[in-house]
């Protein structure tokens, strides 16, 4: 059966459009976020450790592969094949900071500064060796008090991408990290926090800070003590999803 000129033109346009879509789909690469933890926070709240909980909260991200890794895995969880494929690395550590090899720290810092990999540190990872090295600071807070204070997280930069869709919220109990925080001046303070101690008095502390180091973006999020189910809160999970998309190389 013959095809009219008009039909041929229409068919050609359709095929060209399909080819263009196919080329775009092939060119688009799925991005990858690796969530790392040291394996010391398994509990009723976190049976698969903190990295498992954070990874579960990242599942709604579209176009992302979410991978968990830990210090007891081969090559401390980050062989070159995995680290070099990561667009963003999320880090949770507490008791085993000193066990992380200096060689791994150097590889992480190089990936951030030279290649633009995003780096997100949370809660007690202020003492993580990669966080200290990438910022060139001790990361120390002035005091730490596990008194179960209530925390109100306050959005201080509502137009920042990490704050997208987030309103002020409350964590019923947490460990207090007290200012000053020994880090370089941040580019943005996305979240502040107000602790209410058991005696009713209050204290301010910054809770979400950002920096750029070389080609890479860095975010520190204080929320997340391992003895409380804070990583299961929808607001916290939303912040991590926002932070992953913000920190990824553009």
Image: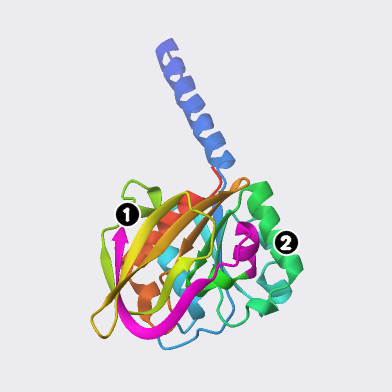
Please identify the quadrant where the C terminus is shown.
top right
For marks 2 and 1, the one nearer the N-term is 2
- Residue 67 location (% of width, % of height): 56, 66
Residue 125 location in percent, x, y? Answer: 54, 71
Relative to 245, say whether 48 is above or below: below
Q: Nearer the viewer, residue 46 or 154?
A: 154
Element type where label 2 sits in the image: helix
**Distance of mark 2 from mark 1, alpha carbons?**
33 Å
Whether the magenta-drawn stretch holds residue 146 is answered as yes
Q: Residue 241, position in %: x, y?
A: 42, 58
Relative to 90, say whether 116 is above or below: above
Q: Which residue is tagged 2?
A: 106
Q: Secondary structure at mark 1?
A: loop
Residue drawn where x is 58% and y is 53% of the image: 87
| Mark 2 closeness class: few <14, some 14–19, many ≥20 residues within 10 Å | some
- Residue 144 appears in which quarter of the rendering? bottom left
User: Does 16 sit above or below residue 198?
Assistant: above
State the residue lying farthest toward the right. Answer: 103
Q: Of circles 2 and 1, which is in front?
A: 1
Instruction: Tell me which segment is drawn in magenta.
Output: 129-156
Question: Quick check: 73 left or right of 62?
Answer: right
Direction left: furthest residue? 200
Give the camera-side residue of 130 and 70.
130
Q: Dividing the picture into quarters, in which one does residue 86 lie?
A: bottom right
Total marks drawn?
2
Quadrant in the rendering for residue 104? bottom right
- Is 117 inside the magenta-drawn segment? no
Label 1, on which residue?
156
Q: Residue at left 38%, top 55%? A: 190
């Amino acid at each position: 059966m013959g095809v009219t000129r008009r039909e041929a033109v229409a068919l050609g346009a359709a095929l060209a459009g399909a080819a263009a879509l196919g080329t775009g789909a092939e060119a688009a690469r799925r991005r990858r976020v690796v969530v790392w933890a040291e394996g010391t926070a398994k509990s009723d709240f976190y049976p698969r450790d903190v990295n498992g909980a954070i990874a579960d909260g990242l599942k709604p991200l579209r176009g992302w592969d979410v991978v968990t890794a830990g210090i007891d895995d081969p090559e401390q969880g980050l062989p070159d094949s995995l680290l070099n494929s990561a667009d963003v690395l999320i880090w949770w550590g507490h008791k085993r900071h000193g066990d992380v090899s200096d060689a791994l720290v150097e590889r992480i810092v190089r990936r951030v500064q030279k290649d633009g990999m995003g780096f997100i540190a949370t809660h007690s990872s202020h003492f993580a060796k990669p966080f200290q090295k990438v910022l060139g600071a001790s990361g120390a807070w002035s005091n730490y008090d596990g008194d179960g204070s209530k925390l109100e997280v306050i959005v201080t930069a509502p137009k920042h991408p990490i704050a997208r869709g987030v309103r002020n919220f409350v964590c019923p109990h947490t460990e207090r990290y007290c200012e000053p925080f020994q880090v370089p001046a941040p580019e943005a303070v996305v979240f502040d926090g107000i602790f209410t101690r058991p005696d009713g008095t209050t204290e301010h502390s910054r809770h979400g800070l950002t920096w750029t180091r070389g080609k890479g973006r860095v975010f520190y999020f204080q929320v997340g003590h391992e003895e409380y189910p804070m990583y299961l809160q929808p607001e916290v999970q939303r912040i991590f999803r926002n932070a992953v998309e913000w920190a990824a190389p553009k």
